[in-house]
Image: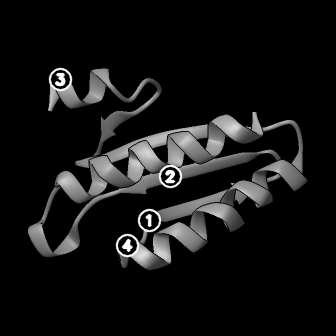
Amino acid sequence: MDLALRKLPGWQVVNGKLHREYRFADFVYAFGFMTAAALRIQTLDHHPEWTNVYNRVTVDLVTHDANGITAKDLDLAAQLEEIAAKLQ
């Protein structure tokens, strides 16, 4: 897990979940991130726990069926990073 987290700056394990908070310029960028991510998330059929407050999006990833963090979560985190990089 430590090696995987080194490849995902800003991500950490909190309460058994892969956790990250993104900050964007404003609400439009934050919501745009969630919209773009939702399209990719739906194709993966692996949905995050996330919240949005103004310019912040907080994401928690865990594979409930496996009762922990799996490769699915790490892959989704990497994809979220790609999307966020285009909007920050």
Q: Residue at x 29, y 47 (%)?
A: 74
Query: Is there a contact, CB below 8 Å, between mark 2 and mark 4?
Result: no
How are the colours assigned in the image? one colour
Secondary structure of the residue carrying tag 4 is: helix
Q: Residue at x 29, y 20 (%)?
A: 6
Q: Residue at x 38, y 29 (%)?
A: 8
Label 1 neighbour load within 10 Å: few <14, some 14-19, many 20+ = some
Q: Residue tagged by mark 2?
A: 59
Q: Amino acid at mark 1?
A: Pro
Mark 2 vs 4, N-terminal side: 4
61 relative to 16 in the view: left or right: right
Mark 3 vs 2, N-terminal side: 3
Tell me the CA gap for discs 4 and 3. 23 Å
Q: Residue tagged by mark 4?
A: 44
Q: Which mark is residue 48?
A: 1
Secondary structure of the residue carrying tag 2 is: strand
